[in-house]
């Protein structure tokens, strides 16, 4: 036979269930509802963006070559590249060598553009089997500190290093010295290395 509960018994039953539920809540979450101190751990993140820095390495006085008007000769300009990626595009911008390093001097030794600019990266190779030589853009001239200069295309390199490109790089520029009556003295110009991170 089914027992018949009065409303009084039902109310007592609900109250008992409520007390049991509250008791379980205290048992299951003691760290939230008790104690005078607590800790929590949050994760934080940053994105490191690509970056690159280039520095010129000064040419030692003892390394300044003595030349004669016997044709083309090379000069190597030294740089250091530091990048947080292993792929870098490298190019060159080179001016003629002017007497006393004065850009307005008409006594100058011109860049031999058809020989290109060789790029010597000590710990890297050109990508896709390319030659480590950039070609001058024949009809383009830019200004570098008052010196008219000729830019090249960019050549993509990949380093042997792990996810970085940190090494010395030489740009080898050839000059055309075929003028027999060139006044003696010191001639100077500028060479710029252009470096771009390859995405």
Image (cartoon, rainbow, N blue to C red):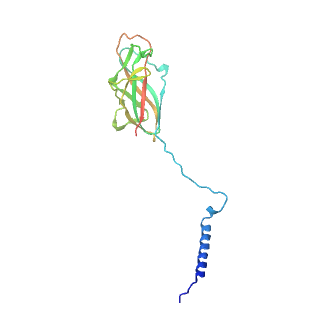
Percent of width and height locating residue 99: 42, 14
Tell me the residue at 34%/38% (across/down): 128
Q: Nearer the viewer, residue 161 or 98?
A: 98
The vertical placement of 55 against 87, above or below, is above
- Asked whether, in this view, residue 162 is left or right of residue 42, the answer is left
Q: Quadrant of the C terminus?
A: top left
Left of 62 or right of it: where is 31? right
Residue 144, image x, y percentages: 42, 23
* Residue that extends furthest to the front in the rendered view of this protein: 7
What is the tally of numbered marks visible in this picture? 0
> In the orientation shown, which residue stands out farthest toward the bottom?
1
- Measured along the vertical axis of the image, is residue 142 above or below residue 8? above
Residue 136 horizontal side relative to residue 45, left or right:
left
Provide residue 171's location: percent of width, then percent of height: 41, 27
Viewer-proximal residue among 168 and 17: 17
Q: Nearer the viewer, residue 199 or 65?
A: 199
For this orientation, the residue located farthest to the right is: 36
Residue at image point 62% right, 73% down: 19
Residue shown at 34%/36% (left/top)?
129
Q: Quadrant of residue 163?
A: top left
- Percent from the top left, x then y, of residue 63? 47, 21
Residue found 34% across the figure and 24% down from its top = 140
């Amino acid at each position: 036979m089914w027992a018949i509960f009065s409303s009084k018994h039902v109310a007592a039953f609900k109250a008992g269930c409520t007390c049991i539920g509250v008791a379980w809540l205290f048992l299951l979450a003691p760290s939230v509802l008790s104690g005078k101190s607590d800790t929590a751990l949050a994760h934080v993140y940053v994105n490191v963006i690509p970056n690159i820095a280039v520095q010129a390495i000064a040419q030692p006085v003892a390394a300044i070559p003595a030349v004669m008007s016997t044709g083309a000769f090379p000069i190597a300009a030294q740089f250091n590249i530091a990048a947080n990626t292993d792929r870098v595009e490298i190019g060159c911008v080179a001016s003629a060598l002017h007497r006393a390093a004065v850009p307005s001097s008409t006594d100058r030794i011109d860049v031999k553009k058809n020989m290109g600019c060789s790029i010597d990266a000590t710990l890297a190779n050109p990508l896709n089997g390319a030659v480590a030589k950039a070609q001058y853009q024949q009809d383009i001239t830019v200004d570098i500190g008052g010196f008219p200069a000729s830019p090249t295309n960019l050549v993509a390199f990949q380093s042997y290093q792990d996810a970085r490109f940190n090494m010395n790089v030489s740009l080898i520029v050839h000059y055309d010295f075929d003028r027999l009556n060139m006044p003696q003295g010191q001639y100077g110009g500028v060479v710029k290395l252009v470096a771009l991170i390859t995405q």
